[in-house]
Image (tube, rainbow, N blue to C red):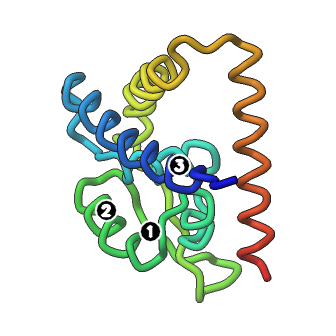
């Protein structure tokens, strides 16, 4: 059996990113783009985390984050501070401007969910997401080897 799951997941991600950007544009949200939204999402869950945590939770490479975080800081979405307990670490914090954008992000995310799951039953959504979690766990285990 030839499995196309990896290819399909890549295509879903690419198309999803384009649709997310289009919805941001339609809603006149120009304070952040899709990848920056993923960074903000992590910080909305837990503020004041190291860059490594942002990378792990957002799926963005640390090398990609450097430039993005600089832009976000210039746009006054985040601030950086040294960790007082470990001066080698830099912690990222949301600004008030970024906190005020959460409702916009949630609105776009809700619309994305409606697009993703159009025509799915609640049972199908639960089953599908359980498969995705299993795939993610498999990938995480493999990446730790």
Foreground of the two, 106 or 95: 106
SS state under label 2 = helix
**Residue 73 marker:** 2
Instruction: Give the distance between the C-alpha atoms of the residues marked 2 and 1, in whole angstroms.
Output: 8 Å
Q: Residue furthest front?
A: 1
Foreground of the two, 7 or 64: 7
Instruction: Give the distance between the C-alpha atoms of the residues marked 1 and 3, in whole angstroms.
Output: 33 Å
Residue 104 versus residue 122 in the image, above or below: below
| Residue assigned mark 3 | 9
Give x and y (percent) for residue 13.
44, 47
**Residue 96 marker:** none
Disc with the residue nearer the chain's start (1 vs 3):
3
Instruction: Give the distance between the C-alpha atoms of the residues marked 2 and 3, in whole angstroms.
Output: 31 Å
Left or right: 38 as drawn, with respect to 132 = left
| Residue assigned mark 1 | 80
> Residue 17 falls in which quadrant of the image?
top left
Task: Rate crowding at label 3 as few (under 14), some (14 to 19) or many (20 or more) other CA atoms within 10 Å.
Answer: few
Q: Residue at x 79, y 49 (%)?
A: 134
Residue 132 versus residue 55 in the image, above or below: above
Asked if the residue under mark 3 is in contact with the one under mark 2, i.e. CB atoms within 8 Å, the reply is: no
Nearer to us: label 1 or label 3:
3
Give x and y (percent) for residue 47.
59, 52
Residue 100 versus residue 41 in the image, above or below: above
Disc with the residue nearer the chain's start (2 vs 3):
3
Asked if the residue under mark 1 is in contact with the one under mark 2, i.e. CB atoms within 8 Å, the reply is: yes
Q: Residue at x 50, y 54 (%)?
A: 7
Give x and y (percent) for residue 38.
47, 49
Q: Residue at x 76, y 73 (%)?
A: 142
């Amino acid at each position: 059996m030839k499995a196309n799951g990896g290819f399909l997941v890549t295509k879903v991600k690419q198309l999803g990113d384009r649709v997310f950007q289009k919805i941001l544009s339609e809603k006149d949200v120009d304070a952040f783009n899709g990848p920056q939204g993923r960074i903000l999402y992590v910080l909305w869950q837990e503020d004041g985390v190291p860059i490594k945590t942002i990378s792990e939770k957002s799926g963005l490479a640390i090398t990609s984050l450097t430039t993005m975080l600089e832009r976000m800081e210039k746009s006054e979405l985040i601030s950086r501070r040294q960790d007082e307990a470990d001066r080698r670490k830099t912690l990222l914090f949301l600004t008030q401007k970024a906190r005020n954008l959460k409702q916009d992000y949630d609105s776009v995310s809700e619309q994305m969910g409606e697009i993703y799951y159009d025509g799915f039953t609640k049972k199908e959504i639960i089953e599908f997401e359980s498969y995705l979690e299993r795939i993610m766990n498999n990938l995480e285990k493999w990446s730790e080897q």
